[in-house]
Amino acid sequence: MTVAGNSAAAIDLKFEVALIPVADVDRARRFYSDLGWRLDADFPVGDTFRVVQFTPPGSPASIHFGTGLTSAAPGSASGLYLVVSDIEAARAQLIERGAKVSEVFHREGPGKPAINGRDPARRSYRSYATFSDPDGNGWLLQEVTERLPGRVDGDTTAFASVPDLAAALRRAAAAHGEHEKRNGGQHDHNWPDWYAAYMVAEHAGKPLPE
Protein backbone atom coordinates (compact mmCIF):
# COMPACT_ATOMS: atom_id res chain seq x y z
CA MET A 1 0.00 0.00 0.00
CA THR A 2 1.38 3.42 -0.99
CA VAL A 3 0.36 6.64 0.70
CA ALA A 4 0.03 9.52 -1.73
CA GLY A 5 2.63 12.22 -1.23
CA ASN A 6 4.93 10.01 0.87
CA SER A 7 7.92 10.76 -1.34
CA ALA A 8 7.33 14.51 -1.43
CA ALA A 9 9.67 16.85 0.44
CA ALA A 10 8.50 17.68 3.94
CA ILE A 11 6.72 21.00 4.27
CA ASP A 12 8.29 23.45 6.72
CA LEU A 13 6.28 23.93 9.90
CA LYS A 14 7.77 27.05 11.40
CA PHE A 15 6.79 27.76 15.00
CA GLU A 16 5.83 31.43 14.88
CA VAL A 17 3.92 32.58 17.97
CA ALA A 18 3.33 31.63 21.62
CA LEU A 19 0.22 32.97 23.34
CA ILE A 20 0.60 34.22 26.91
CA PRO A 21 -2.39 35.11 29.13
CA VAL A 22 -2.39 38.55 30.80
CA ALA A 23 -4.88 40.46 32.95
CA ASP A 24 -3.87 44.01 31.95
CA VAL A 25 -2.97 44.34 28.29
CA ASP A 26 -1.58 47.87 28.53
CA ARG A 27 0.61 46.95 31.52
CA ALA A 28 1.98 43.94 29.64
CA ARG A 29 2.60 46.07 26.57
CA ARG A 30 4.63 48.57 28.64
CA PHE A 31 6.65 45.78 30.25
CA TYR A 32 7.68 44.08 27.01
CA SER A 33 8.27 47.41 25.29
CA ASP A 34 10.58 48.47 28.14
CA LEU A 35 12.53 45.22 27.65
CA GLY A 36 13.35 46.42 24.14
CA TRP A 37 11.26 43.83 22.36
CA ARG A 38 9.90 44.82 18.95
CA LEU A 39 6.22 45.76 18.82
CA ASP A 40 4.85 44.14 15.67
CA ALA A 41 1.12 44.70 16.07
CA ASP A 42 -1.58 46.08 18.33
CA PHE A 43 -4.99 45.40 16.78
CA PRO A 44 -8.09 46.23 18.84
CA VAL A 45 -11.52 45.25 17.52
CA GLY A 46 -14.18 46.91 19.66
CA ASP A 47 -14.12 46.17 23.40
CA THR A 48 -14.00 42.38 23.18
CA PHE A 49 -10.94 41.62 21.07
CA ARG A 50 -7.37 42.90 20.95
CA VAL A 51 -4.13 41.20 19.90
CA VAL A 52 -0.67 42.53 20.65
CA GLN A 53 2.47 40.95 19.20
CA PHE A 54 6.05 41.42 20.43
CA THR A 55 9.25 39.77 19.19
CA PRO A 56 12.36 39.41 21.37
CA PRO A 57 15.62 40.70 19.80
CA GLY A 58 17.04 38.17 17.35
CA SER A 59 14.12 35.74 17.77
CA PRO A 60 12.34 34.03 14.86
CA ALA A 61 9.27 33.53 17.08
CA SER A 62 6.98 36.06 18.78
CA ILE A 63 4.45 36.31 21.60
CA HIS A 64 0.78 37.26 21.48
CA PHE A 65 -1.34 38.60 24.32
CA GLY A 66 -4.51 40.62 24.46
CA THR A 67 -8.26 40.41 24.97
CA GLY A 68 -10.52 37.60 23.78
CA LEU A 69 -7.61 35.32 22.87
CA THR A 70 -7.58 32.63 25.56
CA SER A 71 -9.46 31.37 28.60
CA ALA A 72 -6.22 30.48 30.41
CA ALA A 73 -5.63 32.18 33.75
CA PRO A 74 -3.40 35.27 33.55
CA GLY A 75 0.16 34.42 34.49
CA SER A 76 -0.25 30.68 33.93
CA ALA A 77 2.35 30.40 31.15
CA SER A 78 5.69 29.03 32.32
CA GLY A 79 8.91 27.59 30.94
CA LEU A 80 9.11 30.10 28.10
CA TYR A 81 12.70 29.70 26.93
CA LEU A 82 14.91 32.56 25.77
CA VAL A 83 18.19 31.19 24.42
CA VAL A 84 21.17 33.52 24.81
CA SER A 85 24.86 33.31 23.91
CA ASP A 86 26.01 35.14 27.08
CA ILE A 87 23.74 34.68 30.09
CA GLU A 88 25.48 37.23 32.30
CA ALA A 89 25.24 39.96 29.66
CA ALA A 90 21.61 39.07 28.89
CA ARG A 91 20.71 39.12 32.60
CA ALA A 92 22.36 42.51 33.11
CA GLN A 93 20.53 44.00 30.14
CA LEU A 94 17.15 42.70 31.29
CA ILE A 95 17.70 44.06 34.80
CA GLU A 96 18.70 47.43 33.37
CA ARG A 97 15.40 47.46 31.46
CA GLY A 98 13.30 46.71 34.52
CA ALA A 99 12.98 42.92 34.75
CA LYS A 100 13.56 41.20 38.10
CA VAL A 101 15.91 38.42 37.04
CA SER A 102 17.08 35.64 39.33
CA GLU A 103 20.72 34.91 40.01
CA VAL A 104 22.36 32.66 37.41
CA PHE A 105 22.36 28.96 38.25
CA HIS A 106 23.45 25.81 36.46
CA ARG A 107 22.68 22.10 36.34
CA GLU A 108 25.06 19.20 35.80
CA GLY A 109 22.48 17.58 33.50
CA PRO A 110 18.75 17.22 32.80
CA GLY A 111 16.78 16.70 35.98
CA LYS A 112 19.79 17.48 38.20
CA PRO A 113 19.45 19.98 41.08
CA ALA A 114 20.21 23.65 40.54
CA ILE A 115 23.66 24.88 41.61
CA ASN A 116 24.41 28.56 42.23
CA GLY A 117 26.39 30.36 39.54
CA ARG A 118 27.14 29.90 35.88
CA ASP A 119 28.48 26.55 34.75
CA PRO A 120 32.24 26.80 35.51
CA ALA A 121 33.21 25.38 32.12
CA ARG A 122 30.52 27.42 30.30
CA ARG A 123 29.15 24.22 28.81
CA SER A 124 26.25 24.76 26.44
CA TYR A 125 22.70 24.22 27.76
CA ARG A 126 23.83 24.19 31.43
CA SER A 127 23.37 27.80 32.70
CA TYR A 128 20.03 29.48 33.45
CA ALA A 129 18.25 32.45 35.00
CA THR A 130 14.54 33.22 35.38
CA PHE A 131 12.19 36.20 35.40
CA SER A 132 8.46 36.86 35.15
CA ASP A 133 6.27 39.50 33.58
CA PRO A 134 3.85 41.54 35.75
CA ASP A 135 1.20 38.80 35.50
CA GLY A 136 3.60 36.04 36.54
CA ASN A 137 4.19 34.40 33.16
CA GLY A 138 7.57 32.72 33.62
CA TRP A 139 10.58 33.11 31.34
CA LEU A 140 13.74 31.01 31.45
CA LEU A 141 17.07 32.21 30.07
CA GLN A 142 19.33 29.42 28.84
CA GLU A 143 22.90 29.90 27.66
CA VAL A 144 23.61 28.00 24.44
CA THR A 145 26.96 28.48 22.75
CA GLU A 146 27.16 25.24 20.77
CA ARG A 147 24.25 23.15 19.52
CA LEU A 148 24.07 19.41 20.03
CA PRO A 149 24.25 17.28 16.85
CA GLY A 150 20.95 17.19 15.01
CA ARG A 151 19.59 20.32 16.70
CA VAL A 152 20.01 22.51 13.62
CA ASP A 153 19.62 22.11 9.88
CA GLY A 154 23.01 20.88 8.72
CA ASP A 155 22.52 22.50 5.34
CA THR A 156 21.88 25.97 6.75
CA THR A 157 24.12 28.22 8.82
CA ALA A 158 22.43 31.30 10.21
CA PHE A 159 22.87 33.55 13.21
CA ALA A 160 19.96 35.27 14.90
CA SER A 161 21.79 38.46 15.82
CA VAL A 162 25.05 40.38 15.64
CA PRO A 163 26.06 39.27 19.19
CA ASP A 164 25.47 35.61 18.26
CA LEU A 165 27.68 35.97 15.17
CA ALA A 166 30.33 37.85 17.17
CA ALA A 167 30.37 35.11 19.82
CA ALA A 168 30.78 32.44 17.12
CA LEU A 169 33.68 34.40 15.61
CA ARG A 170 35.38 34.66 19.01
CA ARG A 171 35.09 30.89 19.54
CA ALA A 172 36.46 30.28 16.04
CA ALA A 173 39.35 32.70 16.71
CA ALA A 174 40.27 30.91 19.94
CA ALA A 175 40.14 27.50 18.25
CA HIS A 176 42.15 28.81 15.29
CA GLY A 177 44.84 30.05 17.66
CA GLU A 178 45.21 26.50 18.97
CA HIS A 179 45.24 25.24 15.38
CA GLU A 180 48.18 27.54 14.54
CA LYS A 181 50.05 26.42 17.68
CA ARG A 182 49.71 22.79 16.61
CA ASN A 183 51.19 23.75 13.26
CA GLY A 184 54.37 25.32 14.62
CA GLY A 185 52.97 28.78 15.28
CA GLN A 186 52.99 29.71 11.60
CA HIS A 187 50.43 32.23 10.39
CA ASP A 188 47.63 30.49 8.52
CA HIS A 189 46.97 32.49 5.36
CA ASN A 190 43.84 30.44 4.75
CA TRP A 191 42.30 31.44 8.09
CA PRO A 192 39.03 32.69 6.49
CA ASP A 193 38.39 29.21 5.06
CA TRP A 194 39.28 27.63 8.43
CA TYR A 195 36.96 30.02 10.31
CA ALA A 196 34.14 29.29 7.88
CA ALA A 197 34.57 25.52 8.16
CA TYR A 198 34.73 25.73 11.96
CA MET A 199 31.64 27.93 12.31
CA VAL A 200 29.54 25.81 9.95
CA ALA A 201 30.58 22.57 11.69
CA GLU A 202 29.97 24.01 15.15
CA HIS A 203 26.53 25.31 14.16
CA ALA A 204 25.53 21.92 12.76
CA GLY A 205 27.00 19.93 15.65
CA LYS A 206 29.47 18.16 13.38
CA PRO A 207 33.13 17.26 14.15
CA LEU A 208 35.22 20.42 14.36
CA PRO A 209 38.31 20.96 12.20
CA GLU A 210 41.72 20.72 13.85
Image (cartoon, rainbow, N blue to C red):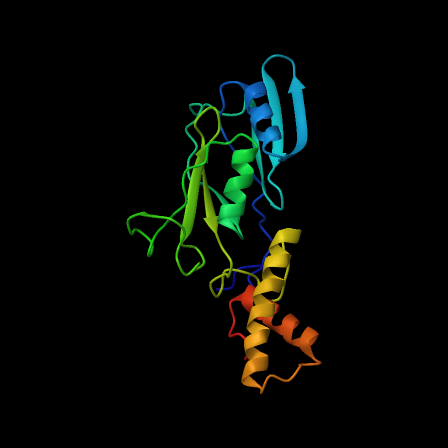
For the residue pair 134 and 102, the one nearer the viewer reads as 102
For the residue pair 210 and 204, the one nearer the viewer reads as 210
For the residue pair 74 and 9, the one nearer the viewer reads as 74
Q: Is residue 32 visible?
A: yes
Residue 27 spot, x, y in % from top left: 55, 20
Q: Residue furthest front?
A: 185
Residue 121 spot, x, y in % from top left: 41, 61
The quarter of the picture where the C terminus appears is bottom right
Image point 51% across, 58% down: which residue? 145
Image point 55% across, 67% down: which residue? 202
Which of the 4 image quarters holds residue 67?
top right
Q: Is residue 209 visible?
A: no
For the residue pair 114 and 41, the one nearer the viewer reads as 114
Q: Could you tell me how many numbered marks the image carries?
A: 0
Residue 24 spot, x, y in % from top left: 52, 18
Q: Is residue 29 above or below residue 59?
A: above
Image point 62% across, 42% down: which residue? 57
Residue 46 spot, x, y in % from top left: 65, 13
Q: Is residue 148 above or below residue 95?
A: below
Which of the 4 image quarters holds residue 78?
top left
Q: Is residue 141 above or below residue 183?
A: above
Q: Residue furthest top?
A: 47
Determine whether, in the image, residue 195 is placed left or right of residue 147: right
